[in-house]
Amino acid sequence: MAYCKVRKAEIYYEDLGEGKPILMIHGYSPDHRLMSGCMEPIFTKREGWRRIYIDLPGMGLTKEYNEISSSDEMLDAVLEFIQAVIPDQEYVIAGESYGGYIARGIIEKHQEQILGAAFICPLIIPLPENRTVEIHEIMRTDEKFIENLSKGELEDFRNNNIVLDEYTWLRYNKEILSGCKIADEKFLNKVKNKYGFSFKIDQSDFIKPSVFLLGRQDSSVGYKDALDIANKYPRGTFAVLDMAGHNLQIEQPQLFSTLLNEWLDRIEEFQN
């Protein structure tokens, strides 16, 4: 647990393990617990990886970020963090939702240093009205369990998940809601006015091992927009998972783990 001072923020991060750095970037509103919750179990049986979990400005425990007003400046803060914490090193990135958008910005700026990239339900198109998304649909419900939730809890659970059972609720509450509850909503709304980068991304092919994990029932960012950039990732696995919405890593944990492990295997093979 530490802080890294960059020009427009003091970024909170957790630094675990030793080896090749892998930077974990969460989505919009939650904090690093979203990524550590789904990624740390993968590394209980893998050695040689230094996992770096950050809190983006306006989220988690990151502070002194009020000068930031756009995704361009969000990206700048992350790039400065990378240079400060893992200067001039090769590394891997994994991003969820908005974190996947930031990851594509990093690739556009620093592709030569990146050994691989994972995208979990990635935001492809910033403006919601321009996205191709699915209608929100509940796929499975444990009626007995949801009787234990308050009206407010159940409404939030229904609005943001497609599998409504105890396992999903416990992880959703611990890994996602916990961060959302402490997010700076006023700041996040300000940044949404300049949510898209001012420059083009995906301008060249990313030839390192990559994986896109997409929820077939994702009503937030969808899955079809990601398939439209598949040609830019010639070493990419694109997996569209049924019974998975925008919290795919929780709703399909076994497939998530299998596909992420296979991606890490490919990176290790690529290095050797």
Image (spheres, grey):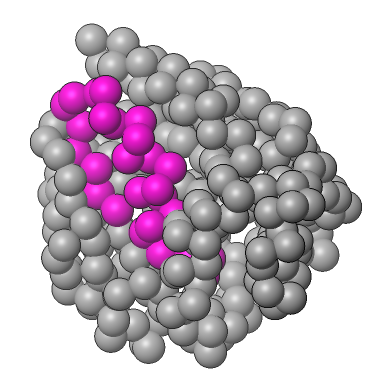
Does the magenta run of residues contain 49?
yes
Residue at 41%, 22% (x, y): give it: 261
Q: Is residue 113 above or below residue 268?
A: below
Residue at 74%, 47% (x, y): give it: 142
Q: Is residue 239 above or below residue 135?
A: above
Q: Is residue 139 above or below residue 3?
A: above
Locate residue 42, reporting x and y percent.
Answer: 35, 31
Does the magenta run of residues contain 202?
no
Q: Is residue 159 left or right of residue 25?
A: right
Location of the C terminus (image quadrant):
top left
Location of the N terminus (image quadrant):
bottom left
Q: Is residue 35 left or right of residue 235?
A: left
Locate residue 169, reporting x and y percent.
Answer: 59, 55
Q: Is residue 201 above or below residue 28?
A: above
Q: Who is closer to the viewer here, 162 or 206?
A: 162
Locate residue 81, reporting x and y percent.
Answer: 23, 61
Magenta region: 27-53
